[in-house]
Every structure is written in structure tokens, then in C-alpha cells.
């Protein structure tokens, strides 16, 4: 997905997010079309139309600020559905490539391999077909690793995720997020729950797909709302099957109710306040007012959009404090600090800030456990080279001392 952003900015400039937003809309439309094709192949054209519509309606049935951004989970969906679409037609090499694409967008996309393997087994389980599936999956991943850096690729996609996927942190905080986002999706699907319960035993590959997607949601124990988007395609297919076993009047009523619920989520997205975004905008205005174009700044926060909004280059490759502290917005109470950083990051950070110190340093931790007072390197940098320059919306500003 970073390559997608880079390509969009190269073609259309980096002053607007409209191109990537349009790409996200296109991703959802492609997903809906693939779902329609899967449903039509099983239950007819009407079921195909219903499945596509349900996917689009249910995809807005979560916290809009979390799930409607042009983020990894959105671009994951076309590849996961394409994997099932290809496997359903016994295009095993292409199915493997689609699984690889899903994995390369987001690691949890690889769980779609489970229903793909079930379809392979039900198709006869031939060794040649399995080889095609394996080769189709391995080649894109291997090519990507070689095009970047094999050791770095392995670290950033697999071995470096240990802390993120650990059991550390506040259990009530994590459990509350899991229950809230599950309740939101259940609310968006409320008109479909009874038909689903009455539909009888669904095809095994769809049940396995839904279960594998639930496993993907659980992985990492963060339970962000956008994780739940992975549940939507199999849920839409299962609901379309269930509705087309119901009388036409009941089917139409369920669709109208689901559309009404989706409209409520859209209104939420349009009307709800956005405190984090508003804070980032105010902070960006302050950064722009205190620096000249081209002057490097360091924003110590979890909101990298401040750099883009301010139009100022970052002083470090680490655009958030996460990799340097193990702080994550998804898990309160996790161990944070320099000892828990990704190995080697502080060495790189010290070299970057020593070679070309940022003109302005913004501490936007606002008293969090990843604030500079808990971090010896950052605390020393502030004490030796910077002086206070006021506060903005709770964030502390520091400017580089002359000489």
C-alpha cells in the first residue's frame, strides 16, 4: 500500500488525498463485484446483486473515522475475495498470487489461504494443482523481498511484529475495544442476524472463510475497527444466501433495514466531531507559523499527518513515536520506553538528529507514558539543544538554540 500512495502522489501530486480516496472507493467496488460473481455462481443473479449491495452497506457499519480511511484493511479486501474467486474456478496459480497480494498488503490477509486450501481439497486435492497454488503464492512474495531487502522484508513483515502481537497491555482496555467494534458490526448487520440464524448449514468454505477472518481480527489483540472489515465479504455472502431462502417481502425488508442502518453510520461519519484531526490541524498551523518552508521539524506524537498538514519535512524517518517506544494506540498499559524499542532505532534516531537537528521539536505526548521525561535520549536532546517556545493545544514546542 505505501507503493500505491507513492504512485498516486507521483502521478497527481501530494497536495491532496483525493486520488487515494478514489482508489479506496475503487477497491470496495471491485470487492463488491467479485462477491457478486461468487454469489451468482452459487445462487443466481439476484443473490449476486444482493451480496454486492450487502458488502457495500456493511462496510460502512463500523466507526467511520477508523474504517473509512484509505488504509490497509480496505485495500486488503479485493485480494482476499479474488483468492476465493480464483479458487472457486480452479485457477490455482492465480489464487495463490491473490493470497500473496493479500499478505503483502497486510499480514493477516494470509488467512484466506485456509478456505482456498479447502476448495483445493474438495476439487480433488491434486499435487499439480497444489504446486501451482504454492508457486503462485511464493513468487510475488519472493519478488517483493528481493526488490527491497530480504532480511529487512522478513523483519518488517514477520519477525519484527512480536511486540505488536504480544499479550502485554491493559486487558479491560483491549476487551472494551473488541466488544464495542463487534457490537457496531452486529448493529449494522442487525436485520440480517435472524435470517442467518435460520439459513441452515452454509457451505464449508464460506464458514471457514468467516472463521479465518475472525482469527485475523483477533491476531495482535488490538481490535481496531478496520480489522473487522475483513469479516464483511464472507458475512455479505452468507447473508445473501440466507436472504434468498426467505420470501421476497422479507428479503426486501431486510435490505431496506440494512440500508437504513448504513445511512445512520454515514451520518455519524459526516457529523461526528474529529478531535484528533482538529488537534493535528491546529498543531500544523503552529508548526507552519514557526518555521520556514524546507526547515526540518520533529513532531513527537502518534499523528504523522501533522507533517503533511504543516508542509514541513520530518527530521527523522520515524514519523511516530511507536517504533522508538513500543507505544501503540491500540493497547493501553503496554511496556513503553527506550528498552522496548525496535532494535537499532535509537541509534539511527540519534544519528539523524545529530547530523541535521530539527529547527522545531514538538512534544505532543501530552503526559503519556512515552513522553520525553521517560526517554533519556530525547530528554537529553531537549536539555542540551532546545529552549521552550510555548504550547499549542497541550503540545509543547521547542526551538533550536542558536550556536
Image: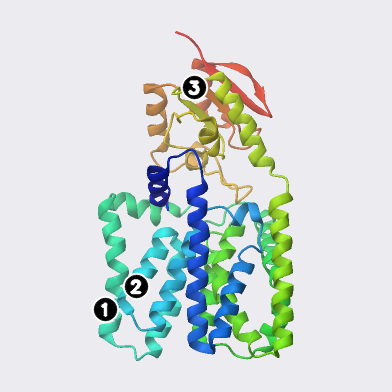
Sequence-first tag of 3 and 1: 1
Q: Residues within 10 Å of mark 3 (few under 14, many from 20)?
A: some
Quarter of the rendering occupied by the C terminus: top left
User: Does the rendering let one see residue 17?
Assistant: yes
The residue where tag 1 is placed is 131
List x then y, in percent, for residue 54: 62, 73
Instruction: Measure the C-alpha gap from mark 1 to mark 2.
Output: 10 Å
Relative to residue 280, is residue 117 depicted above or below? below
User: Residue 151's x, y, as percent?
Assistant: 29, 51
Q: Nearer the viewer, mark 3 or mark 1?
A: 1
The label on residue 381 is: 3
Q: CA distance from mark 3 to mark 1?
A: 55 Å
Residue 179 sits in quarter: bottom right
Bin the neighbour count of mark 2 within 10 Å (Cα to Cα): few under 14, some 14-19, many 20 and up: many
In the rendered view, tell whether residue 315 sits above or below residue 140.
above
Q: Give the side of residue 61 with respect to residue 380, left or right.
A: right
Q: Is 401 on the left-hand or right-hand side of 148?
A: right
Residue drawn at (72%, 55%) of the image: 268
Give the x, y percent position of residue 257.
74, 73
Q: Position of residue 225 (x, y in %)?
A: 62, 58
Mark with earlier residue (2, 3) = 2
Q: Secondary structure at mark 1?
A: helix
Which residue corresponds to mark 2?
Answer: 96
Q: Mark 1 or 2, which is nearer the eye?
A: 2
Is 343 displayed left or right of 288 in the figure? Answer: left
CB under 8 Å between discs 3 and 1: no
Q: Is residue 165 visible?
A: no
Q: Determine the residue positioned at 33% across, 88% down.
A: 125
Amino acid at each position: 500500500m505505501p507503493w500505491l500512495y507513492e504512485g498516486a502522489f507521483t502521478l497527481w501530486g501530494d497536495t491532496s488525498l483525493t486520488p487515494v480516496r478514489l482508489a479506496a472507493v475503487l477497491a470496495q467496488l471491485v470487492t463488491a463485484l467479485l462477491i457478486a460473481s461468487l454469489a451468482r455462481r452459487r445462487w443466481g443473479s439476484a443473490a449476486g446483486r444482493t451480496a454486492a449491495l450487502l458488502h457495500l452497506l456493511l462496510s460502512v457499519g463500523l466507526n467511520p473515522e477508523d474504517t473509512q480511511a484509505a488504509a490497509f484493511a480496505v485495500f486488503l479486501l479485493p485480494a482476499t475475495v479474488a483468492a476465493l474467486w480464483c479458487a472457486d474456478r480452479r485457477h490455482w496459480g492465480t489464487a495463490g498470487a491473490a493470497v500473496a497480494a493479500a499478505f503483502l498488503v497486510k499480514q493477516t490477509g494470509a488467512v484466506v489461504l485456509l478456505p482456498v486450501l479447502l476448495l483445493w481439497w474438495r476439487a480433488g486435492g491434486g499435487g499439480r494443482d497444489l504446486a501451482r497454488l504454492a508457486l503462485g503464492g511464493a513468487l510475488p512474495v519472493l519478488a517483493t523481498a528481493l526488490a527491497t531487502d530480504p532480511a529487512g522484508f522478513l523483519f518488517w513483515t514477520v519477525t519484527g511484529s512480536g511486540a505488536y502481537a504480544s499479550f502485554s497491555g491493559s486487558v479491560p482496555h483491549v476487551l472494551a475495544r473488541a466488544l464495542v467494534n463487534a457490537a457496531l458490526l452486529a448493529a449494522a448487520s442487525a436485520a440480517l442476524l435472524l435470517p442467518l440464524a435460520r439459513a441452515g448449514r452454509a457451505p464449508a468454505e464460506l464458514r471457514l472463510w468467516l472463521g479465518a477472518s475472525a482469527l485475523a481480527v483477533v491476531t495482535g489483540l488490538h481490535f481496531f475497527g478496520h480489522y473487522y472489515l475483513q469479516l464483511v465479504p464472507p458475512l455479505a455472502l452468507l447473508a445473501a444466501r440466507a436472504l434468498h431462502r426467505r420470501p421476497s417481502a422479507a428479503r426486501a425488508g431486510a435490505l431496506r433495514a440494512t440500508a437504513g442502518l448504513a445511512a445512520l453510520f454515514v451520518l455519524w461519519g459526516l457529523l461526528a466531531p474529529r478531535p484528533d484531526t482538529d488537534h493535528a490541524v491546529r498543531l500544523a498551523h503552529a508548526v507552519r507559523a514557526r518555521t520556514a518552508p524546507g526547515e526540518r521539524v520533529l513532531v513527537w506524537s502518534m499523528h504523522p499527518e501533522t507533517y503533511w498538514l504543516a508542509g514541513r519535512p520530518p527530521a527523522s524517518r520515524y514519523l511516530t513515536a511507536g517504533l522508538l517506544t513500543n507505544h501503540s494506540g491500540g493497547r493501553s498499559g503496554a511496556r513503553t520506553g527506550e528498552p522496548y524499542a525496535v532494535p537499532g532505532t535509537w541509534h539511527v534516531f540519534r544519528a539523524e538528529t545529530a547530523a541535521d537537528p530539527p529547527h522545531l521539536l514538538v512534544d505532543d505526548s501530552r503526559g503519556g507514558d512515552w513522553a520525553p521525561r521517560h526517554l533519556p535520549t530525547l530528554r537529553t536532546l531537549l536539555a542540551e539543544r532546545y529552549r521552550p517556545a510555548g504550547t499549542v493545544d497541550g503540545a509543547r514546542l521547542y526551538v533550536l538554540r542558536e550556536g
